[in-house]
Every structure is written in C-alpha cells, then in structure tokens.
Image (cartoon, grey):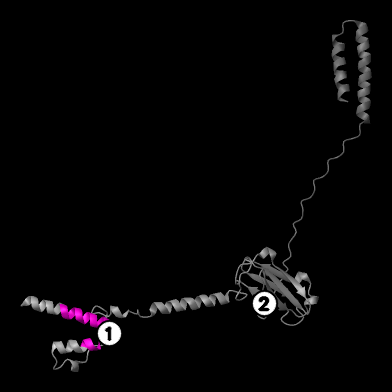
Amino acid sequence: MAALREQAAELERLVGLAQRETSRQLLQAELARVTEALASATTSDPPAAPRPAPAPAPTPIRLSSAPTTAPIDYSSISSYAWDHSNKFVKVYLTIPGLEKIPDAQIEAVFGERSLVLSVAGASTPPVNRRLNVPCLCHAVRDDLCSWVRKPSDMLLIKLRKASDGEEWASLNDSAAQKEMQQKEKTEANKARAPREFPRHCMHPFTPMYRRPAPWPRVLWQGKSTGELLKQMYAEADEEGKLALSKAWESGRDKREGNK
C-alpha cells in the first residue's frame, strides 16, 4: 500500500510536467487506475486490533502468622559401648524400636574431633535421644565416618581414624585430660618442694634452715680448743674431717706467722 501511494504521487508530478496532450492523457489514465487500486486496498485492509488493556497490578499476598515448628528436645545418651582397631573406632548404641525408625529420623554429624548422632522416635521414653561427643580422643576423617543398623535394635557408628594404629584411651578426651591434669599437679608439687642440698654443700654459707644442728653448749664447757677439735674430728664424716684438717692447718699457719 505504501508503494501505491508513492506511485500515485509520482504520476501526479509527471502529469504536471507533461507538455503534449497525448502524454498527459496517458498519465492521467494511469493515475486514475493507481488511485482506484489504492482506494480498494485501503477499504479491504482489516481494522487494526485494539491494544490490550494493561494487566492489573498483582494483589499483595499476606503471609500467614502460623507459628513455626518447635525445636525437638533430645535426651543425652550416656550408655554406650566402644572399641577400636587399627583403622576404626566403633561405637555401639541400643535404641528401642530402631527397626521402625526411618533413616530420615536418624541424623549423624561428624567432625574432625566431634560426633553428634540424633535419633527421633524411639519406642520407649525418652523418645528423642542424642549422643554428643564434642571432643573425641583423637582426630578422625569425617568424610569416611558412617553409621549402620545391626540386629536387636543396635546402631553401629564407625569412626575412621586420622592416623592408623593410634591408641585411644577413651572415646572422648577425658582420659587424656585427666592424665595431663595429674602431670601438671605432680610438676607443681615438685616445684613447691624444698631444695635438697648434697652433703658436700653443708658449709657455713648453707642457709640456716639446712645447717646441721648446733653442738650442745654443755660440750663446750671446760674443754680447750684442741680437745674440741679432736672431738669434732672423731664424730665427723670423711668430708668433715677433711674440712677440719684444712681449718687446723690454716689456723696453725696464722699462729706461726704472728710469732
């Protein structure tokens, strides 16, 4: 239709430019035909479809204020058995009605040094139970740990040791902590104990609380220096006799030097 309009406009322009009567008549006849065709095309075109009305704005949905599900209360599992091999530590739990409890109600979370196993829906109270070991005796490979059902309502937990052949004194680190506390207590007692001096250190410069007991005053009365030295020499040990001999010689040298 746009082409017919352009053709009609061009024919009108040529009619105005034509000089000869014959050419003008031919152009006018062609213009009449194009104009008629343009009019037919205009009336035959279907009317334009009406534009759709804009969609109404969505009505806001009000969220319900229904209460959320309350958290499950679990009772602590304190009774279990365990042993270990070169690679694994095995924990044995007895859960009443375990055969009827689906896997979805058994959840195990393994960490490098922790274990949490939760069971919901036991047949006897407490219905919900949990074994929580926040600090294992040693590290495990959590990606290789698992649990499996056993006959007679028994659940087996398998912990893969991080180091093969590592000895576990207990499932948690309570035994290691107890040993460490005992060691610290022993070291503290040693630090508070009085220092023991060897016998050869018992000289006049030894602290008073470690000096030998003084001679009774009665032994000094009525005796000369020589007699006292002889008595002390007779009662002294080998080191004491050596010290008395040196003291006697030193005193004699001083006496001779004063003469």
- Which residue lies under the disc numbered 1? 237
Residue under the image location 12 percent in, 79 percent down: 252
Residue under the image location 77 percent in, 73 percent down: 149
In the image, is 182 to the left or to the right of 75?
left
Q: Which picture quadrant has residue 127? A: bottom right
Q: Where does the image place residue 136, in percent across and percent down from the top left?
A: 61, 71
Residue toward you, 116 or 213: 213
Residue 61's disc is none
Instruction: Count residues near mark 2 (Cα–Cα under 10 Å), then give few for <14, some for 14-19, many for 20+.
Output: some
Query: Magenta span has 246?
Result: yes
Figure label count: 2
Up the image or down, 215 lies above or below 116; here it is below
Which label's residue is closer to the chain start, 1 or 2? 2
Q: Where does the image place residue 200, in percent across and percent down from the top left?
A: 29, 79
Q: Where does the image place residue 208, in percent across and percent down from the top left?
A: 26, 82
Residue toward you, 64 or 112: 112
Residue 70 at least partly seen:
no
Residue toward you, 139 or 251: 251
Q: Where does the image place residue 142, in percent across and percent down from the top left?
A: 66, 65
Q: Which picture quadrant has residue 6? A: top right
Residue 250 at least partly seen:
yes
Up the image or down, 77 lies above or below 57; here it is below
Residue toward you, 105 or 220: 220
Q: The magenta stretch spans which residues? A: 232-249
- Which residue lies under the disc numbered 2? 82
Quadrant that contains the N terminus: top right
